[in-house]
Each structure stands twice: as C-alpha cells, then as structure tokens.
Image (spheres, coloured by chain):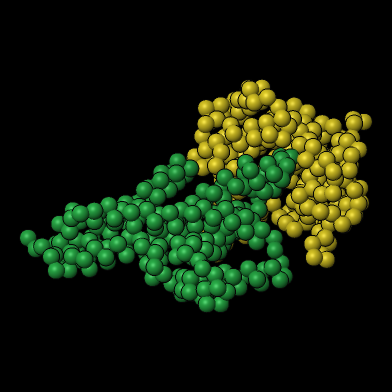
Chain colours: A green, B yellow
C-alpha cells in the first residue's frame, strides 16, 4: 500500500489544529449567513415594490457582487480599505463583511423570486376570504415561499461555507491554511503528507456541509 | 319582494382604457339564484370579481346590504367575509390540509372558536361526501373534490352571498356533475347566489333569473324558461345556437347520398 501520509494527522496536535481551522471557517460563515438571511429577506421583500433610482442602485449592487470574484472582493475590503481609509480591519472582519455583502445580494434575489413565484390567485383567494394583508402573508404566502426558497438558500449556505477557504489569502488561519502549515512543517519527515492532509480537509468540509444538506432534504420531504 | 342583498348600480370597469363593464345595474334579492351567461370576454367573470372588490371600479357603486363595497372600503375585510367566492381553479392553499384550508379564515379573520368551526366544517364536508378527506392535502384530491372543498371553505364563513366563477370549467366531464349537484343543493337551501357558468342545462335548472351579458352590458334578462326557449334578442338567440349542433347532410339510414352500398 502506498504511503498516503496519513500518520502526520496523528502527530502532535495536528488534527486538533485542523479542526480549530474549521471552527474559524464556520464562525465566519455562520455570522455571514445569519446577516445575509436577515438582511437578504428584508431587502428581497422591499425589492418587489421598488422603482426608479433605488431599483437602479440595487441592480448595480447585485451585478457588482455577482461579477466580482470573491477573492477580489476580499482583497478590496482587506487591503483596499487600509490603503484608502486607513481602516485596520482584521482578516476575519473583512471576511465577514465580504461574505455578508455577497450573501445578502444573493439572498434578496432568492427571496424576491420565491415571493414572485406564488401565483396571484393565491393572494386573491385569501383576500376573497376576508383575511387581512398581514394574515395573508403570514399564513398563505410566506409558508409557501419558504418552501420554494429552501433548496436554493441551502445551496447558498454551503457555497458560503466552502468559499471561506479563500480567506487564507488575507491572512486568516482557517482549515486550508492550517493544512498547508502542517504539510510544510513535515516536508522532511513525511513527504507524502500532502495527500493525507488534503484528504482530511476534504472530509472536514464534507462533514460541515453534509448535515446542512441533509437537514434541508428532510424539511423538504416533510413539507412536500 | 324579498330583502335586497346586492345592489349594483351603473357599474363601469375599464382595463387600460378598454371598457369591460359598461353602465351595468343589477339587484340581487335574498334567496335568489342569478346565473350570468354570455360569450367569453363579455365581462361576466369581471363582474363577479368587482362584487368582492378584487377589481377596482371606475364608476358606479356596488352595495352589499346597503353598504358600499370597493377597494377603498375601510371595512373591506368584514365586507368580503360576507361574500363567499369559489374560483375556476379551486385556489386551495397547497401547504395546508383540507381542514386547515377551511378553518383558516373563520378562525383567523372571524376569530371564531376553532372547535366550533371544526364541527361545522366536518358536518359540511359530510354533506358533500368528503368527511374522510379532512386530513388530505389538495394535491391528493381530484379536481371535483378540490372544488367541493373550496365550496365548503366559502360556506364556513357564513356568507350572505355566494359567487361561483366558472367553477366547473377546469373539470373533467364526469366530475362536473358532482360539483353542480352541490350547487343545486345550496340553491334549494335558499342561498343567495351569483353564478357564472357555461353549462347551459345547469343554468336552466338552477337559475331563478338569467342575465345575458354581451360587451359589458346586460343584453337580456328573464326567467330561464323564457330565455332559453324564446330569447327576445337576436344576440341571445345567436349565442344559444352555438350550443346546438346539427349535421346538414345526413340521411336516416346513415349512408350518405351517392354512396349507397351494393
């Protein structure tokens, strides 16, 4: 059997350090996801009714975020703001800002789409029953919209978790950075460590995202 | 004469400058069943939608027991609760089971006790033969069953006026009957109803009065026997002819002339 370099993981605190890296990644994504869902939902509801200048501004914001690679956005916020405004953001803060901007933009689009996809007849039959507008949203429209929103929203969350691997480029020590450090440190003693360590990284990301997908699938089935 | 439930006077409705209903006046008395018929695009569905203010109106007035109803009414919700409406495509809420569909508005909008409404709902479901479907979801029901649930949902609000907007138009032929029989039953109970339909046989059976609409105006009205057997206007006569078929060239033996077998 070829040497997969797995023994490196058990050396010292290597595995614990990797998991610590995951902790940082999850912290960044959790905070960003919460901000994105909150702001994105509000923005998505507002965007259904907007016209004129606010609409143009929102459009620009969305396109800008969508077109720019996340890495460029990270550099822009982390290095750019320091040069231009003299802000001393930590890597983690910069990461949360970028991921929240990105998540909010995408989430608002998803929410708007989900609300628009509810047929107008659903509003009308609820209105014809004499329900108040608040009740129509609470009992008829939102429950249906959330069901439609769930699959793409979960997709967004897992994409955000995965994309945190970019933050090593602005000096945040997360999973991938720890992995690189371990491989570097053991280059002489176990030259095959790259395979074993990256395999561990794969398993770690899988374990972080899989439960999210599972939970979503379960909810979807219950709501079908 | 019985009490007036609905009074429409000089109603005018326009979409983008196009007049759909033009100076239409109509009074519906308590216990009366009025069937509105007419060619497609004549404004009959729009008329129903105006009655419970799903459409804004450009002129005239609609009064429910003397109270004006429009999208500007302050107590619009309370007024709508007095008008039950059943739609062509059922419009049940797909994420709720049959019972929750029925209970939502009485419990949330009318603030009635859930237990009391549930008893009533189950009794009504029994009457339309669906008592064992209370826990089913709309997607598990046939079109005819969905439409009967939609009728029960409207009835549970204790409406003073029922609107039926082409409720059998989306149904398979064999399901049409089960829905129409429920409506006939309601007519026998003395409900006040405004029915839009394309089922002429049914219209004849259920109506106290037929309203024939054409181009947004009442073209002819009267008791069903007179209207169907001896329409007064040429327009109505022509419309009714579209429901009868006749082959011009048909011999009694079933063999066309010039095609005799040897």
Q: Quadrant of residue B172?
A: top right
Q: Where is residue B87 drawn, in percent x and y?
A: 67, 45
Residue at position x 69%, y 44% from top? A134
The answer to whether A107 is drawn above or below residue B194 in the figure is below
The answer to whether residue B246 is visible is: yes
- Report whether A139 appears left or right of B217: left
Residue at position x 67%, y 44% from top? A136
Choose between B157 and A143: the one closer to the eye.
A143
Q: Where is residue B211 drawn, in percent x and y?
A: 82, 46
Quick one: which residue is furthest to the left in this view? A1
Choose between A83 and B199: the one closer to the eye.
A83
Choose between A69 and A193: the one closer to the eye.
A193
Q: Quadrant of residue B92?
A: top right
The answer to whether B117 is drawn above or below residue B246 in the figure is above
Residue at position x 29%, y 56% from top? A18
The answer to whether residue B205 is visible is: no
In the picture, the quarter occupied by the N terminus of chain A is bottom left
Residue at position x 64%, y 38% from top? B150
The answer to whether B184 is drawn above or below residue A198 in the figure is above
Choose between B32 and A16: the one closer to the eye.
A16
Number of on-image labels: 0
Q: Where is residue A20 drawn, in percent x and y?
A: 33, 54
- Report whether B23 appears left or right of B241: right
Q: Quadrant of residue B155?
A: top right
The answer to whether A182 is drawn above or below residue B132 in the figure is below
């Amino acid at each position: 059997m070829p040497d997969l370099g797995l023994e490196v993981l058990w050396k010292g605190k290597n595995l614990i350090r990797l998991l610590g890296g995951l902790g940082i990644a999850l912290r960044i994504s959790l905070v960003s996801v919460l901000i994105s869902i909150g702001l994105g939902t509000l923005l998505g509801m507002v965007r259904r009714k907007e016209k004129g200048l606010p609409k143009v501004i929102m459009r620009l914001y969305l396109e800008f975020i969508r077109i720019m690679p996340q890495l460029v956005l990270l550099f822009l916020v982390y290095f750019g703001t320091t040069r231009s405004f003299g802000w001393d953001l930590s890597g983690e803060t910069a990461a949360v800002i970028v991921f929240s901007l990105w998540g909010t933009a995408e989430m608002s689009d998803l929410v708007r789409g989900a609300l628009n996809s509810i047929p107008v007849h659903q509003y009308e039959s609820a209105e014809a029953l004499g329900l108040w507008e608040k009740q129509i949203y609470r009992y008829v429209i939102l429950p249906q919209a959330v069901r439609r929103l769930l699959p793409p929203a979960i997709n967004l969350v897992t994409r955000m978790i995965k994309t945190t691997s970019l933050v090593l480029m602005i000096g945040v020590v997360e999973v991938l950075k720890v992995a690189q450090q371990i491989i570097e440190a053991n280059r002489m003693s176990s030259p095959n460590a790259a395979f074993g360590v990256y395999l561990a990284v794969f398993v770690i990301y899988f374990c972080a995202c899989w439960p999210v997908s599972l939970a979503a699938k379960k909810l979807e089935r219950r709501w079908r | 004469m019985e009490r007036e439930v609905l009074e429409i006077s000089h109603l005018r409705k326009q979409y983008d400058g196009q007049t759909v209903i033009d100076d239409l006046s109509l009074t519906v008395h308590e216990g009366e069943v009025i069937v509105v018929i007419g060619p497609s695009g004549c404004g009959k569905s729009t008329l129903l939608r105006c009655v419970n203010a799903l459409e804004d109106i450009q002129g005239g007035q609609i009064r429910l027991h003397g109270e004006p109803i429009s999208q500007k009414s302050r107590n619009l919700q309370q007024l709508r609760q007095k008008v039950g409406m059943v739609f062509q495509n059922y419009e049940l809420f797909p994420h709720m089971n049959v019972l929750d569909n029925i209970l939502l508005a009485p419990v949330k909008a009318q603030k009635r006790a859930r237990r009391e409404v549930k008893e009533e709902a189950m009794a009504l479901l029994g009457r339309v033969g669906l008592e064992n479907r209370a826990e089913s979801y709309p997607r598990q029901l046939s079109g005819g069953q969905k439409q009967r649930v939609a009728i029960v949902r409207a009835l549970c609000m204790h409406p003073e006026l029922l609107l039926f907007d082409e409720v059998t138009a989306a149904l398979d032929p064999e399901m049409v009957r089960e829905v129409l029989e429920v409506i006939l039953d309601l007519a026998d109970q003395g409900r006040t109803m405004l029915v839009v339909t394309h089922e002429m046989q049914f219209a004849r059976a259920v109506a106290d009065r037929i309203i024939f609409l054409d181009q947004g105006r009442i073209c002819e009205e009267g008791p069903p026997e007179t209207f169907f057997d001896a329409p007064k206007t040429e327009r109505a006569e022509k419309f009714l002819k579209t429901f009868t078929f006749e082959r011009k060239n048909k011999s009694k033996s079933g063999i066309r002339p010039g095609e005799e077998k040897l």
